Amino acid sequence: MKHIGKRLGLLLILCLTAAALWSLNSGIDKPALVNTEGRSFERAEVVQVLRDNRQENGSRIGDQIVLLRLADGAQETANCPNGMLFGAVCEPGMPVVAMSSRAGSLVTYTVYSYDRTLRVLGFIAFFCFLLSLVGGRRGIRSVAALLSTFLLFLFLFLPLLMHGIAPIPAAMVTAGLILLLTVWLVCGWSRQAAAAAGGAFGGVFFAGLSAVAFGESAHLSGYDMRINAYEPHGIRIYRRFCYVKSSKIVLFSA
């Protein structure tokens, strides 16, 4: 009966946490940091290099022209730039990410980068397998703790910033929840686990207080000449954090 009560309580806590995170994320007006209007990205495979950019001395100058097979099976000619920001040295059979740019009825394709999706997922799966193999049940719980850390950072810490919460309090709240969840998953409920979690959270808490105290005393805000640089352009400065709300950038400093 005790085990059933514990499981029901755990299920209730998980449901309440999921509902709170959903409510926190549903009220966010997420601005577009990069304008992608008229552009889309999709996976493709290089079928043939129509024009290479390799010179006689082995260097590469200019762009490649390649034939791509898109995810829907269609074949399109694409430009592959030799740039530092995006592009790739294409070979037949190479998986790539293609960027399609649409202007009216005209659609052009550009090779954006090498498609690393399978490699990244394969490395993560191999890491989780090794962790589970070495740690056994605790290894599996450690994988769950790592996944929970990523989800809390994505769905708790970032939304708190978007709602206007200062980074240091938001980080302390997120770190506290991650510590509690990790200790519970790996060690279970015990006095030793509670002491370890309390000590770790105490370190995070006093580190945050030290950062605030030192920043206030040393006048460190991350912005030099902040009033002259920002306020004439209509950007108001209040406290020690910044966030983006709607299409306006609001900077907070000391």
Image: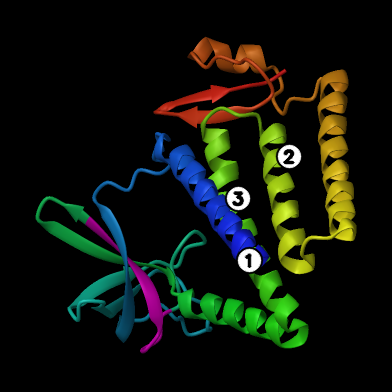
Disc 3/disc 2 C-alpha distance (Å) = 12 Å
Q: Is residue 175 left or right of residue 53?
A: right
Q: Is residue 163 above or below residue 252?
A: below
- The image position of residue 221, as x and y in percent, is 74, 25
Task: Find numbered disc 3 in the image and state the secondary structure of the residue it sits on.
Answer: helix
Mark-to-mark CA distance, 1 and 3: 35 Å
Q: Which residue lies at the image location 56% right of the left edge and 59% below the top edge?
A: 8
Q: Secondary structure at mark 2?
A: helix
Between disc 1 and disc 3, the foreground one is 1
Task: Classify 35 as above or below 228.
Answer: below
Q: Give the amino acid at mark 2.
A: Met
Depicted 82 relative to depicted 131: above or below = above
Q: Which residue is mark 3?
A: 153
Would you place residue 221 above or below residue 48 in this image? Answer: above
Q: Badge 2: how crowded within 10 Å, few (<14), some, or many (20+)?
A: many
Specify which label sits upstream in the sequence, 1 or 3.
Answer: 1
- Does the CB distance between marks 3 and 2 fall below 8 Å? no
The one nearer the camera, 211 or 107, is 211
Amino acid of disc 3 = Phe
- Left or right: 98 with respect to 191? left
The three-letter code of the residue at mark 1 reads: Met
Q: Quadrant of residue 122?
A: bottom right
Identify the residue at the far left of this view. Answer: 105
Task: Name the residue: 85% across, 59% down.
Answer: 193
Q: Which residues are magenta?
A: 90-101
User: Which residue was labeled with disc 1?
Assistant: 1
Task: Identify the coloring.
Answer: rainbow
Q: Residues within 10 Å of mark 1 (few under 14, many from 20)?
A: few
Give the residue pinned by disc 2: 172
